[in-house]
Structures are given as C-alpha cells and as structure tokens.
Image: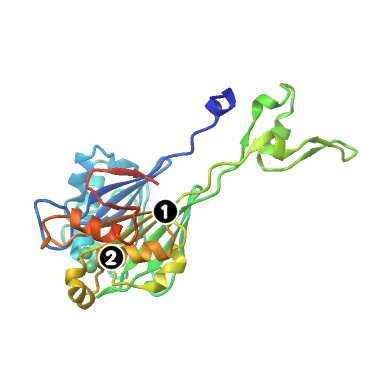
Amino acid sequence: MTETQTLRPVPFPFALTILGAGSATPSLRLHQTAQLLSIGNDYVLIDCGEGTQLRLIEQRIRPGRLRYIFISHLHGDHYFGLAPLLSSLNLAGRTEDLFLFGPRGLDEVLTTIFRVSDSRLGYRLHFQVVDPSEPALLLDHPQMTVQSIPLQHRIDCTGYLFREKPHKPHLLRDKLPDDVPVAYLKQLKNGENILDADGKLLYAASEYTESAPAPRSYAFCSDTRYVEELIPQLHGVDLLYHEATFMEDNAQRAAEVYHSTAKQAAMIAAKAEVGRLLIGHFSSRYKQFDLFLDEARAVFPETYLAIEGETTHV
Ligand SMILES: [Zn+2]
Ligand SMILES: [Zn+2]
C-alpha cells in the first residue's frame, strides 16, 4: 500500500444495526421493528417497536447521540416503544433538540401521554408530519438527504430513503510541492484547475486528486404490499430493507393484509437493481427463517436476513 493510500481519509461510518426484526405478534425470539442507522456522529432511529430502548442498552448504543427518529406508520409494532424512549432521554437530562418524522396523529398520541402523566420534556422535540401520498425531501443534512417512500399498507405508511451526499475528491498531497498555497489545495479539492496570472495551467485537478468513493444509500421499506411503483425510486440503492412477513405459501394472506412475501421483496430488489437486500418483519407463524432466505435468493441472490444485533455497513 502506498503512503497516499494509507493517508486517505476513511469515509465516515454509514452503518445499519437491526434492533428488531419481528412483526406484530409478540414473540420471545424476535423483537418488533426498530433499526439504528449511524451516519457520521449522528444516530438515526428508524421505527421504534416496543422495548426499543432496552435493545439500545443491550447493543451498548448511547441514546444521547440520537438526533433523528423516523416512524413509518402507527401500527403499534412500529412505535409503541417511542414514548418510553423519549421519556428516558428526558430522565437522562437531555437538552439537545430531537427531530421526529412520522404520520399525522403521532404528535397527538405523544402529547396525550405526556399531558396525562404531567411530564415535561427538558429538550425540544420537533415533529414533522410526513405526507404518505408522494415522495418528498424530508431532511437535508450536511452528510445526507432523507426522502419519503410512499408504501401501500392497511393504514398510511411511509418508507425512508437515506442518501449520502457526494464526497469531495481526495487530494494527492504527496504529488504536490510543499510550498503550494493552501488556497490552491482547496481549489484542487473542489475539482478546479490552478492557473497562473496568464491563464497557463499550473496544477490540473485530475492529476493531483483522485475521485472519492461513490455516495452510499439505504432504503427502508416498512410494512407494504407488493408495489411495483416503488421500483424507480429504489433504483440502484446500495442496501434495501424490504419487509417479508410471509412466504409464498401465504401469498393470498399477504395480499389481504397488505404485506409482502420473501419472493415479492426479492422481485422488488431485482427489478430495482439494488446492491443488497435485507428482509425482516417475519410472521411468528414461521419457525425457520432460513426458508425465507431460500425463497428470496432464488430470485435475488444478494439477499440476507435482518438479524437482531447485527450491523451492516452500507
Ligand atoms: Zn408491522
Ligand atoms: Zn403495519
């Protein structure tokens, strides 16, 4: 490895930890939906099923670093852990703002809980209603953007698409003379050539920089029936989570209750040409999750089970 390579800055972490991969029926084997995405120094919580705060403790994840929470829909298995978590953050003395995105009505539920328990949060909780009908840009963070993904479920339901912003090119510092002015280095990093007063090329950006790794993306598709309209929005994402509550033996049942099968999740992944597929939200009627994997891999080989406690780098 050359010196230039060892000095190259490592892109900031972009990793997903599964906290819960089960569905609505309580089970001792699987917890209800919750995922933690770490982007740089910020933690993003995606859905917050019952007991999520205990999962965070179990995984030694400091909830103080949570900055954003995205809730897909108001079925209890996706948000019944939220009020306890918000309450505990208050008990721990949080003062930093927290940003919550979710369906209309979520604010009413939380306001009622905190009003009747005479609780006051010592931090500001900013709530943004997510429109479930069409994709929208929800968050423009220095390192990522978040868009909503309209899903089709028994009640309004939204998925979320997290896209890293492009990185600047890496400067090949060793190729440049020591006395190059700092202003030039900045320009080169921005991809600009350095010219002298007469317009003659001094340093070409292409020669003294190398392109940064491609920006990464993660799409979370919560409870939904099979919806081909999602495919253009999901096209080419690096990692897709798509629910797979049932297998094809219960395809009829899946359609009736607006859920998907493992095969359907894989068909979405294949048609959207994503990098990898994670499936979860398994119905408690199944005992062997490997069968979900077999069914999905027959259509999309790069499929993996969402396993609680495992972290996947996007
Ligand atoms: Zn669910
Ligand atoms: Zn649901």
Task: Name the one closer to the observer, 110 or 298.
Answer: 298
Front-lying residue, 24 or 74: 24
In percent of width and height, residue 234 lies at 43, 63
Q: What residue type is labelled 1?
A: Gly
Q: Give above or below for 250 relative to 122.
A: below
Q: Quadrant of ligand 2?
A: bottom left
Residue pushed farthest right?
198
Q: Name the residue under label 1.
A: 275
| Numbered disc 2: secondary structure | helix
Q: Residue at x 47, y 58 (%)?
A: 236
Other-residue count near label 1 (Cα within 10 Å), few / some / many at <14 / 14–19 / ≥20: some
| Residue at image mark 2 | 263
61 on left or right of 12: left
Disc number at residue 255? none
Establish whether ligand 1 lies closer than 8 Å to the Cβ of label 2. Answer: no
| Rendered location of residue 155, percent (x, y) | 26, 74
> Total of numbered circles in the picture?
2
User: Which residue is at a point 17% across and 45% down the rendered structure image?
Assistant: 54
Near mark 2 (Cα within 10 A), the count class, few <14, some 14-19 or many ≥20, is many
Where residue 190 appears, as percent x and y from the top left, is 67, 42
Q: Is residue 276 in view?
A: yes
Q: Which amino acid does label 2 sit on?
A: Lys
Residue 79 visible: no
From the viewer's perspective, is 140 left or right of 25?
right
Q: Is residue 47 above or below residue 67?
A: below
Element assignment for label 1: loop
Q: Which of 290 and 6 is in front in this view?
A: 290
Corner quadrant of residue 128: bottom left
